[in-house]
Amino acid sequence: MLKALCLSLLLCAGLLAQDTVVVLLRHAEKSHKGDSALLSHTGQRRAASLPPQLGPYAPSALFASNLRRTQQTLEPLSKALALPLQIYERGREGALAQRILTLHSGQVVIVCGHSDTLMVLVSALGHGESFPEISGFDRYWVLRIDAGSGKVTLQEHQQEPLGDREAGPLQRAKG
């Protein structure tokens, strides 16, 4: 009887386990080169287009690097969801991965980073395959860590063209 009860509890716990999902994106277009660059007008428009695209993921946390342009990119989403931005230090993506895996296991989080740091974060989160070079501003990636197997998958998505807000996140998924 006790054995059956323990088995039932383990099965229930497994059913309750949730995948950890990390939505990753590069900051929107910037006004000039350099670490101090802020978002350009186009970048501000792109940032304003993110709430209807990323809001349906229902994140529990938003992370932006300590460079202002990543924070500007997520500010409209932060306001729309009434979620504060959590700032991490650029170059410390390994520590951010540990923070996500420890404090946000089984949750959805969104991270805004840089073309040269997202691949480091993806690797630190356990994805062993190569990550594409990031040259544009119009994509995002969904990294999923399966709660049961620990398998890590990564799926690329195209952001909606600026001004087009009809498609939902699942309609833009690429295989």
Image (tube, rainbow, N blue to C red):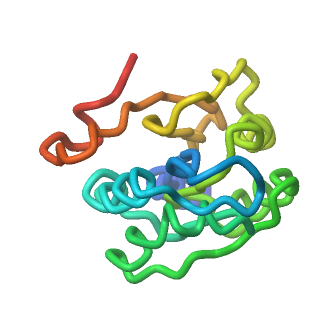
Q: Quadrant of residue 47?
A: bottom left
Image location (x, y in percent) of residue 29: 51, 47
Residue 153 percent across, percent down from the top left:
57, 29
Task: Look at the image and tell me in which quarter the N terminus lies.
Answer: bottom right
Please determine whether, in this image, residue 169 is positioned above or below residue 61. Answer: above
Q: Along the horizontal axis of the image, is 80 left or right of 73?
A: left
Q: Nearer the viewer, residue 18 or 43?
A: 43
Q: Nearer the viewer, residue 46 or 83?
A: 46
User: Does residue 175 lie above or below 150 as drawn?
Assistant: above
Left/right placement of residue 135 relative to residue 79 reads right
Q: Is residue 33 left or right of residue 47?
A: right
Residue 124, given in percent of the width and then of the height, sits at 80, 42
In the figure, residue 2 lies in which quadrant?
A: bottom right
The residue positioned 60% from the left and 41% from the top of the image is: 145
Task: Residue at 39% x, 71% y: name it.
Answer: 76
Residue 115 placed where, x, y %?
68, 38
- Residue 78 at least partly seen: yes
Relative to 161, residue 76 above or below: below
Q: Residue at x 33, y 62 (%)?
A: 48
Residue 133 or residue 106, whichever sits in front = 133
- Quadrant into which the C terminus falls: top left
In the image: residue 119, left or right of residue 42: right
